[in-house]
Image (cartoon, rainbow, N blue to C red):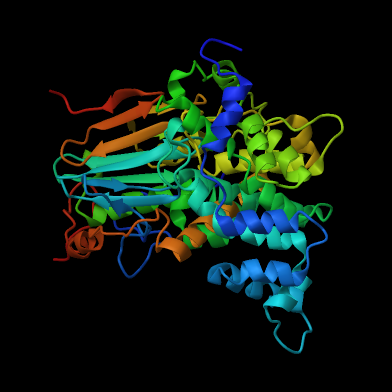
Amino acid sequence: MGTGSVNLTTLLASLDRLPALPATAARAVSLLSKNSSSAAEIERIFRVDEGLAAATLRRANSVTYAAGASRSFGLKESITRLGNRTLMRLALEHQAASTLRDAGKCYGLERGALWRSSIGGAAVAERIAQESRTVDPDLCFSAALLRDIGKLALDALAQGERAMNWGRSVDRPFVDIERERFGADHAEIGALLAEKWSMPAEIVLAVRHHHAPPESPINAVCDIVHCADCVTRWAGLGIGDDGMCHPLSPRARDAVDLHRERVEALAAYGLEFVTTLDRELHGNRTGEPRTTGEGDDVAGALDTGTGTMGNRRKSA
Amino acid sequence: MSVPSTPLQPGATPLGGSPGTGLGAPRSSLALPESKIVVGVADMTVSRDAGRSIVTYALGSCIGVTLYDPIAKVGGMLHFMLPEGKTSPEKAKANPAMFADTGIPLLFNNAYKLGANRAKLIVCAAGGAEILAEDGHFRIGARNRTMLRKIFWQNNVLLSADETGGTQSRTVTLSLATGTVSIRSQGKESVLWAPAA
């Protein structure tokens, strides 16, 4: 460990002081991790959250799940139809915002930036998994959504110090700097936190390796989450003091068949997903009410060409 | 790369702009109490409110383009993500600010509508960083930089100042009072362009 690093005991103790997953999500994850849970037990948790219940009904009655059905499904039937991974994804998607919205301060991220990056990466990972047809898209969504939860812990450990002061980062992976400073990087710490939250082992593994997918044995979910993280950066989401200092694994890139056209389409898709969701939740992408009156300016300017240097000419 | 033949000519039809407002794509730009207009990713705004500044946060491989007419006091900023709209034509139509080849012409045309004079425009750019150790497979930042220069070269637009490349993030601010463009990166603030004293 380098200068200023903290020991593992301190690190783990800090996890106890972190904001936990919202109660509904925590109970849902705990229950859904056990394959023995009944639909009635899950329903008891989901029905107390109106938004989560509505999302579950929407999903179960969507074309994907209800094609050919002659009637709509109630909540309990929907839970039975969707299965544990989809239900976990819905619970996390629905409830992670409150946990992630304020995270990433030590990286200089504006409020909401880490949540937008998390949800954008989740959408990209889901899309890659859907196209691959070999990995569960809901599992990839959940893993990518939680990939940066270690930054919650680094916010607490940094005690207000900005990440740009941890070490020079423009020419080496930022996780190296985190390890020197804290004895562990945000991916490792995030995996510890995911374990503490009783996440399934596949999600813990993907969080741990989202900046360095394992070479042996190769894990498809880790590869997808890693590539989705890079695509999200190209989409301009979640870029803080760590800049672009997270390399892409060439092996994972090839395994996922990530090429330029696909990256650009995925980046555009991820950003659009975030923008749409943000607008649905908050009315615009920044999550704040829009107050600008720029439209008035333009309306008054449409007829004001100067007629010089090639500008729009006034009609005589 | 295909480039619009005369995209920056004043009076040209904005590519894909919103006909209702004539603004194009400032739909999510946000006025903050401290008189900052925030431009998000794949977003743009133009204004002639000299009491405010325009800012875009944390450019990575995306590029922020600013323009400013010091006489008309009209300024604008675009934060584009990718070089060419042809990769996602529907998205380019819905949000031209996402791409260089659709966003840059719209930025200029929106500024003209506010009274900017092309000959007076001071144009700056920042961003276009690359993922660390990228082996040339994608070069998103470089392709953004190339498209920016190609469009400007074909339209006889000179960059007054730029800071692009590297791996670091950059936050860019344009003062609508003076046209000063500043960059904050790695905790350091620097002036990219400022009027002569």
Which of the image's four quarters has the N terminus of chain A? Answer: top right
Residue B155 lies, in percent from the top left, at 38, 42
Residue B32 lies, in percent from the top left, at 26, 49
Q: Can residue B142 be seen by looking at this rendering?
A: no
Residue B138 lies, in percent from the top left, at 64, 35
Q: Residue at x 46, y 63 (%)?
A: A281
Which of the image's four quarters has the C terminus of chain A? Answer: bottom left
Q: Residue at x 22, y 49 (%)?
A: B33
Residue A70 in the figure: left or right of residue A54 = right
Residue A27 vertical position relative to residue A179 in the rendered view, above or below? below
Residue A14 in the figure: left or right of residue B47 = right
Residue sitting nearer the eye, A283 or A293? A283
Residue A40 vertical position relative to residue B34 in the rendered view, above or below? below
Give the mark count.
0
Residue A39 in the figure: left or right of residue A307 = right
Q: Residue furthest right?
A: A217
Q: Residue at x 58, y 35 (%)?
A: A150
Residue A187 lies, in percent from the top left, at 64, 32
Q: Residue furthest bottom?
A: A70
Which picture quadrant has residue A284?
Answer: bottom left
Residue sitting nearer the eye, A196 or B132? A196
Q: Can residue A156 be seen by looking at this rendering?
A: yes
Residue A95 vertical position relative to residue B8 in the rendered view, above or below? below
Which picture quadrant has residue B169?
Answer: top left
